[in-house]
C-alpha cells in the first residue's frame, strides 16, 4: 500500500466518532510526523483534548500525558516530582519522570498560557530540541507531538512570545456548525475514545525511519520562489472585517520548520520532492492573530497560481498590441481608399495628418481619418465636436481631431468642426488644407507594425490546462480542509473568467 493511502486510512479511523475536527486531527498528525507542535485555540467544551487523544491512537503502544494548567501549577506536576530517595541516598537532584511529560509520546497541555515561567522555560527546550535535563543527565524525549490548547492568545508583554513561536501549527476551532453533525453528536453515546486498527498505526521503528527519510526529501526551486512571494506579501496582510493592513512577522527559525513540515507532507503523499501542491496548509503556520488568517490563506493561494496570472497578463498585453496594429492597418487601408477617391489632391504629413495652411502660424494639423469623417459644412447644422491641443511630442505643433467622448488631452480646448472639399472649419472659421504642388508625389500612408503569428487560442487552451492540472494537484493534498478547497475554487473562478474574457477579446483579431 502506498503511503498516502495508509495515511488516509489512518485519518479516517482517527476521525471516527469525532465531529468537524478533521482539520485539527490531520494537521496534528502532519505536525507529529514532522516532529513539530500544534496549538489549538478555542472556547471550552469543543473537543480540543480529544484531538490529542486521537493522536495517541495513531502510534502503536504510545504513552500520553495530559494536564490542565493553572497559575498554581508546579514543575513537579508536569515533569515529575523530585526523587526523595535518590536525594537522600546519592545527594542527587533528579525527578521521578515515569508517567509524566518526559516519558510521553503525545502530550496535551490545556490553558498553556497559565503555566508559570519555570514550566514555560523548560517547555522551550522540550518543544524545540526534544530534550529534558534531569539532574546531571540530559534525556532525549520520545515526544512525537505536543498539543497545547487555550481559549485566548498569549498576553502581550509577559514574555510569552518565544513559547508562542515554538508552536509551528496554529488552528482555531469552535463548536459543531452543521446541523446534521450536531444531531449525530447529540445522539452518539460513545465515550469518544477510539482504537485505530493496528494495521495503520505507526510504530516507533517506522517513525524513526520516516524521520530519516523526510530529511532527505528535496525541495523544488519553484517552492522556494513561491515562499519568497509569500514572505514579501506578509508585509501587508488585510485583517478580517477591517480596512487595516498589518505586517506579519515570521522568524527565520519558523520558516526553517515550515520547510520541514513541507518535507513531511511530500513524504506522506509518496513524493521524493516538495512541490507547490504541498504549500497551501502552511498558512496555518504564518498567522499570529486569527484576524490575519483568511488573508494569509488568500496570499498563499494567489502565490500558487501567480505564474499563470503573469503569463495571462503578458498574453493580454500582446493581444492588445496586435489588436491596435490590426486596427491601424484597417484604418490605413480605409484612409488610402478614401484619399484616392475624394482627397487625393491633399498633401499628407507624417502618414497621419493634413496641414492647415493658415491656422496657428502654419503649425496646425488635423488627423486624416477625423477629417474624412467630418460632416460637410454646407449641410451640417452644428458641425462635429472636436478638440484642439498641443502635440506633447512636438509642442510647437497644434493637433486637431474629432472628440469621441474620451478624456481630454492635457490642455485641450473644445471646438466645433466641419469640412468641405478643400477646407476645415473650426468654430465656423474656414482654413485651407494644403494641397500637393504640381508634379509633387503623394506620400501614401504605410501600415506600420505587424500582427504576430501567435496561436493565441492554443496558448489559452494550454494555459487553462496548466491551471487545471495545478488545481487538481493542490486539491489532492490530503491535508486541506473543505474551507481550503472552497477558497481555491473561489479564486480560480476569477482566473478562469479572465481566460474566458481574453478568448472573447481574440474575436477582434478575427474580424
Image (cartoon, rainbow, N blue to C red):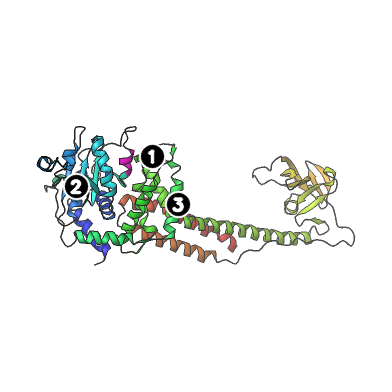
| 170 vs 369, nearest the viewer | 170
Q: Residue furthest front?
A: 90
Residue segment shown in magenta: 152-165
Residue 154 lies in the magenta stretch:
yes
Q: Main secondary structure of the magenta part?
A: loop
In three-dimensional space, the C-alpha distance between marks 2 and 3, rounded to whole angstroms, equals 38 Å
Residue denoted by label 3: 228
Please state which of residues 255 and 44 is positioned toward the viewer in this rendering: 255
Q: At numbered mark 2, what does the secondary structure look like: helix, strand or loop?
A: helix
Q: For the N terminus, which image quadrant? A: bottom left
CB-based contact (under 8 Å), mark 1 and mark 3: no
Q: Quadrant of residue 427?
A: top right
Does residue 90 appear to the left or right of 282 in the view shown?
left
Q: Which residue is mark 2?
A: 102
Taking the image as shown, residue 403 lies to the left or right of residue 150, namely right
**Alpha-carbon neighbours of circle 2 within 10 Å: few (<14), some, or many (≥20)?**
many
Is 423 colored magenta in this rendering? no
Q: Which sits earlier in the primary sequence, circle 2 or circle 1? A: 2
The residue that label 1 is drawn on is 240
Q: Which mark is residue 35?
A: none
Amino acid at each position: 500500500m502506498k503511503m498516502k493511502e495508509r495515511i488516509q486510512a489512518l485519518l479516517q479511523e482517527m476521525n471516527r466518532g469525532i465531529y468537524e475536527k478533521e482539520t485539527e486531527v490531520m494537521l496534528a498528525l502532519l505536525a507529529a510526523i514532522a516532529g513539530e507542535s500544534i496549538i489549538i485555540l478555542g472556547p471550552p467544551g469543543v473537543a480540543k483534548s480529544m484531538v490529542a487523544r486521537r493522536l495517541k491512537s495513531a502510534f502503536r503502544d504510545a504513552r500520553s500525558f495530559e494536564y490542565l494548567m493553572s497559575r498554581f501549577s508546579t514543575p513537579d506536576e508536569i515533569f515529575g516530582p523530585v526523587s526523595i530517595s535518590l536525594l537522600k541516598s546519592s545527594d542527587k537532584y533528579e525527578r521521578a519522570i515515569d508517567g509524566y511529560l518526559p516519558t510521553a509520546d503525545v502530550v496535551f497541555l490545556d490553558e498553556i498560557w497559565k503555566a508559570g515561567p519555570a514550566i514555560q522555560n523548560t517547555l522551550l527546550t522540550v518543544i524545540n530540541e526534544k530534550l529534558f535535563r534531569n539532574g546531571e543527565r540530559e534525556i532525549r524525549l520520545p515526544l512525537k507531538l505536543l498539543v497545547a490548547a487555550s481559549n485566548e492568545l498569549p498576553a502581550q508583554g509577559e514574555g510569552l512570545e518565544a513559547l508562542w513561536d515554538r508552536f509551528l501549527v496554529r488552528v482555531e476551532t469552535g463548536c459543531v456548525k452543521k446541523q446534521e453533525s450536531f444531531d449525530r453528536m447529540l445522539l452518539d453515546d460513545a465515550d469518544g475514545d477510539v482504537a485505530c486498527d493496528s494495521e495503520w498505526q505507526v510504530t516507533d521503528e517506522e517513525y524513526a525511519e520516516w524521520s530519516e527519510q523526510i530529511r532527505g526529501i528535496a525541495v523544488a526551486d519553484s517552492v522556494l520562489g513561491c515562499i519568497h512571494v509569500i514572505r514579501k506579501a506578509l508585509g501587508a496582510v488585510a485583517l478580517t472585517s477591517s480596512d487595516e493592513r498589518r505586517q506579519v512577522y515570521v522568524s527565520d527559525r519558523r520558516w526553517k520548520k515550515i520547510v520541514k513540515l513541507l518535507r513531511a507532507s511530500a513524504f506522506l503523499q509518496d513524493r521524493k520532492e516538495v512541490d507547490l501542491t504541498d504549500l497551501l496548509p502552511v498558512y496555518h503556520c504564518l498567522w499570529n492573530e486569527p484576524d490575519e488568517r483568511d488573508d494569509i490563506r488568500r496570499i498563499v493561494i494567489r502565490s500558487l497560481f501567480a505564474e499563470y496570472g503573469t503569463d495571462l497578463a503578458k498574453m493580454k498585453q500582446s493581444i492588445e498590441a496586435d489588436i491596435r496594429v490590426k486596427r491601424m492597418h484597417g484604418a490605413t487601408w480605409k484612409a488610402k481608399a478614401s484619399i484616392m477617391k475624394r482627397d487625393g489632391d491633399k498633401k499628407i504629413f507624417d502618414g497621419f495628418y493634413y496641414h492647415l495652411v493658415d491656422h496657428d502660424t502654419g503649425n496646425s494639423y488635423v488627423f486624416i481619418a477625423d477629417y474624412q469623417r467630418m460632416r460637410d459644412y454646407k449641410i451640417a447644422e452644428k458641425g462635429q465636436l472636436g478638440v484642439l491641443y498641443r502635440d506633447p511630442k512636438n509642442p510647437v505643433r497644434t493637433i486637431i481631431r474629432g472628440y469621441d467622448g474620451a478624456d481630454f488631452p492635457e490642455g485641450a480646448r473644445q471646438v466645433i468642426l466641419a469640412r468641405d472639399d478643400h477646407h476645415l472649419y473650426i468654430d465656423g472659421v474656414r482654413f485651407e488644407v494644403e494641397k500637393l504642388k504640381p508634379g509633387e508625389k503623394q506620400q501614401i500612408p504605410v501600415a506600420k507594425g505587424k500582427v504576430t503569428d501567435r496561436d493565441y487560442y492554443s496558448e489559452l487552451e494550454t494555459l487553462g490546462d496548466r491551471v487545471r492540472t495545478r488545481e487538481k494537484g493542490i486539491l489532492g493534498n490530503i491535508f486541506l480542509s473543505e474551507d481550503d478547497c472552497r477558497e481555491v475554487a473561489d479564486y480560480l473562478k476569477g482566473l478562469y473568467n479572465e481566460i474566458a474574457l481574453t478568448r472573447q477579446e481574440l474575436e477582434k483579431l478575427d474580424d
